[in-house]
Image (tube, rainbow, N blue to C red):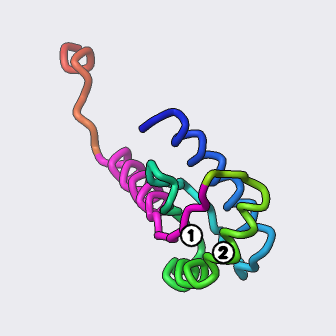
Amino acid sequence: MSRRIDRVNELLRREISTVIQHDYEWNGKMVTVSAVEVTQDLKEGKVWIGVIGGSAEPIVDKLNRAHGSIQSAVMKRVVLKSTPVLTFKHDNSAVRGVEIVNLLQEVDKLPKAPLEDEEEA
């Protein structure tokens, strides 16, 4: 991907995150924008949303229904040649990360083979 597209993705990620946090109420859930991927022609953009503390489906549905107002709020702050049409998708990497950490902690509790130095003694 080009540096320009990477910069646009990061800029949009920050601005969309700001709009989502300030303009919407999430009732005890933590909603984060983990990544934005726009096409080379800046016509479409996928926004990856992470949700902690509840189901992600209603939140992603709510954001997809409100994508027009989110787009206009973001584009008032970001000037681009064309406004990408935003599509929100669930990113479950945070949940997977927590599961992996828990698995690693369980593995750490299992009995371990003795080290080579201990075997010789």
Residue 93 place in picture, x, y as percent = 44, 58
The residue to which callout 2 is attached is 29
Residue 118 lies, with reference to residue 32, above or below; the image says above
At a point 49% along the width and 54% down the height, the residue shown is 38
Can residue 103 be found in the magenta stretch? Answer: yes
18 or 40: nearer the viewer: 40
Task: Find residue 39 and report its horizontal and vertical position in percent.
Answer: 44, 53
For image coordinates 55% across by 79% down, the residue present is 64
Badge 2 element: loop
Seen in the picture, residue 58 relative to 38 is either above or below; the reply is: below
Q: Are marks 2 and 1 in contact (CB under 8 Å)?
A: yes
Q: Position of residue 99 (x, y in %)?
A: 41, 60
At 56% from the left and 69% from the top, the residue drawn is 51
83 to the left or right of 97: right
Q: Position of residue 98 (x, y in %)?
A: 47, 57
Q: Which span is picked out in magenta?
A: 82-110
Q: Is residue 111 left or right of residue 73?
A: left
In the rendered image, the quadrant that contains the C terminus is top left
Please tell me how crowded label 2 is: few (under 14), some (14-19), or many (20+) other residues with Cα within 10 Å.
some
The local crowd at label 1, few if under 14, some if 14 to 19, many if 20 or more residues have their Cα within 10 Å, is many
Residue depicted at x 61% and y 61%: 83
Q: Tell me the CA gap for discs 2 and 1.
A: 7 Å
Q: Residue 106 colored magenta?
A: yes
N-terminal of the pair, mark 2 or mark 1, is 2
Q: Camera-side residue: 59 or 85?
A: 85
- Find residue 113 and report its image quarter: top left
Please give the residue where the numbered disc 1 appears in the rendered image: 51
